[in-house]
């Protein structure tokens, strides 16, 4: 199963290597980042370059994803890169979601798919 992740980046780009490592272990197969013009410079580690797509925005940090009347980058990423029947994880760069120590996010989704469950809750561990 392919599991995609969408994220907006304003700051904290120093967390990116840890973020990519964490979510790769959780089963994410591709990362889509919406980078604000005011964000720190991104350095994508070489081993992740084939699974990362960065959309550079001309918007500054003042225009945030909560300003739905102006722009909603998470919605744009979802509409552009995520198929109607695909699973994705929306996350901030400082959020490291887990299900449990022994169950990856992708495995929990697979269980839900097999049991025809529609909704499950993920608790977030915020850095």
Image: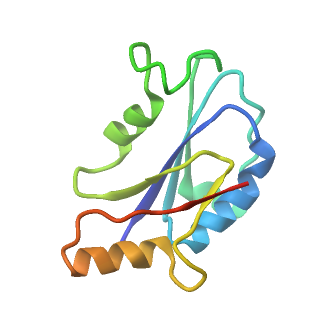
Q: Nearer the viewer, residue 79 or 108?
A: 108
Quarter of the figure that contains the N terminus: bottom left
Relative to 92, 82 lies left or right: left
Name the residue furthest bottom.
Answer: 102
- The reply to whether residue 110 is in sight is yes
* Position above or below: 70 against 64: above
The picture places residue 34, in percent across and down from the top left corner, at 55, 35
Q: How is the image coloured?
A: rainbow
Q: Residue at x 76, y 41 (%)?
A: 12
The picture places residue 99, in percent across and down from the top left corner, at 51, 72
Q: Residue at x 76, y 51 (%)?
A: 15
Name the residue furthest left.
Answer: 116
Q: Residue at x 72, y 28 (%)?
A: 39
* Position above or below: 56 against 114: above
Q: Residue at x 23, y 81 (%)?
A: 114
- The reply to whether residue 45 is in sight is no
Relative to 76, 61 lies left or right: right
* Count of numbered tags: 0
* Position above or below: 39 against 84: above
Name the residue furthest right.
Answer: 14
* Position above or below: 74 against 65: below
The picture places residue 19, in percent across and down from the top left corner, at 68, 57
Residue 101: name its quadrant. Answer: bottom right
Q: Nearer the viewer, residue 45 or 104?
A: 104
Quarter of the figure that contains the C terminus: bottom right
């Amino acid at each position: 199963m392919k599991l995609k992740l969408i994220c907006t980046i304003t700051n904290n780009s120093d967390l990116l290597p840890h973020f990519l490592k964490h979510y790769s272990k959780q089963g994410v197969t591709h990362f889509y980042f919406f980078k604000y013009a005011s964000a720190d410079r991104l350095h994508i580690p070489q081993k992740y370059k084939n699974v990362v797509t960065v959309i550079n925005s001309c918007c500054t940090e003042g225009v945030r994803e909560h300003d739905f009347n102006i722009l909603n980058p998470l919605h744009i990423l979802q509409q552009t890169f995520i198929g109607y029947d695909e699973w994705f994880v929306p996350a901030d760069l400082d959020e490291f979601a887990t299900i449990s120590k022994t169950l990856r996010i992708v495995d929990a989704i697979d269980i839900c798919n097999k049991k025809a469950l529609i909704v499950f809750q993920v608790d977030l561990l915020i850095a």
